[in-house]
């Protein structure tokens, strides 16, 4: 992956507090990009496709209603979304471990790792994979290891792009971020991937 990448389709794995609002704002700000948010929970996806969203944030309802069904979609069809995407966000929970080493302190990456395994299982073409957790170093390292083991012949670029959203001001924070953090490998492919995500982030501003 050394040629410039123009992101036309985004898949977000995880329709929770970060994934749903973040992708709604991206779809609103980037009308030329198709954004698909996937989740294993059918009730949660049904809620995102209804007038009773699963999350309340000031301004979120209006943004979702503006772009849903146009270039913002919510579905449980993870496979199609991954296959079609140029860029994939992993936006799943990273709860604190409840047992084992690091119990009560360390983040539990089981959902991140499950999402990475799903991507490795499905993707056959180059993908930019962006993890959105607030434990970026550990999560990115874990994702890279899974890709290397499960899909060694598929060129993935793994980036970290944590979101620091405050309850009650999430939409405002996404529309007018005071900073955007993007971490990637110091390689040609890594720089191309960072540039591609930067173009999406700059369009959001």
Image: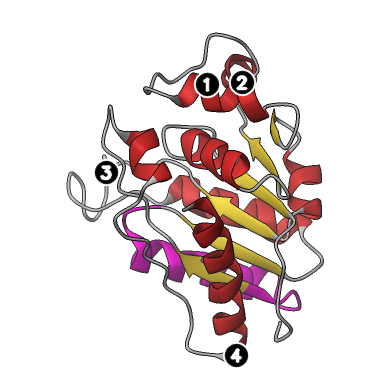
Q: Please tell me whether residue 146 belongs to the stretch shown in magenta.
A: yes
- The reply to whether discs 3 and 4 touch (Cβ–Cβ < 8 Å) is no
Q: Foreground mark, 1 or 4?
A: 1
Going from the N terminus, do you reach mark 1 or mark 4 first? Answer: 1
What is the secondary structure assignment of the residue under circle 2? helix
What is the secondary structure assignment of the residue under circle 3? loop
Q: Foreground mark, 3 or 2?
A: 2
Q: Which residue is mark 1?
A: 62
Q: Which residue is mark 2?
A: 65
Q: Which residue is mark 4?
A: 188
Q: Residue at x 80, y 68 (%)?
A: 125
Q: Foreground mark, 1 or 3?
A: 1
- Asked whether the viewer can see residue 13, the reply is no
Local crowd size for mark 3, using a 10 Å CA cut-off: few (<14), some (14–19), many (≥20):
some
Going from the N terminus, do you reach mark 1 or mark 3 first? Answer: 1
Tell me how far mark 3 sits from mark 4, CA to CA: 35 Å
- The reply to whether discs 1 and 2 touch (Cβ–Cβ < 8 Å) is yes
What is the secondary structure assignment of the residue under circle 1? helix
- Asked whether the viewer can see residue 30, the reply is yes
Q: Is residue 198 above or below residue 187?
A: above
Q: Please tell me whether residue 121 belongs to the stretch shown in magenta.
A: no
Q: Is residue 97 above or below residue 160?
A: above
Tell me how far mark 1 sits from mark 3, CA to CA: 33 Å
Q: Which residue is mark 3?
A: 96
């Amino acid at each position: 992956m050394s040629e410039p990448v123009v992101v036309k389709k985004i898949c977000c794995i995880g329709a929770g507090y970060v994934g749903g609002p973040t992708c709604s704002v991206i779809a609103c700000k980037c009308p030329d990009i198709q954004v698909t948010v996937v989740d294993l929970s059918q009730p949660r996806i049904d809620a995102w496709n209804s007038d009773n969203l699963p999350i309340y944030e000031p301004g979120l309802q209006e943004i979702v209603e503006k772009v849903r069904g146009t270039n913002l979609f919510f579905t449980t069809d993870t496979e199609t979304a991954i296959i079609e995407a140029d860029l994939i966000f992993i936006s799943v929970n990273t709860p604190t471990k409840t047992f084992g080493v690091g119990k009560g302190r360390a983040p539990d990456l089981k959902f991140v790792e499950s999402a990475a395994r799903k991507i490795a299982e499905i993707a056959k073409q180059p993908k930019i994979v962006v993890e959105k957790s607030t434990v970026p170093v550990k999560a990115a390292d874990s994702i890279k290891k899974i890709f290397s083991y499960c899909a060694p012949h598929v060129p993935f670029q793994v980036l970290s792009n944590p979101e620091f959203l405050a309850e009650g001001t999430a939409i405002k924070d996404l529309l007018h971020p005071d900073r955007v953090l993007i971490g990637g490998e110091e390689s040609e492919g890594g720089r191309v991937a960072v540039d591609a995500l930067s173009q999406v982030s700059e369009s959001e501003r």
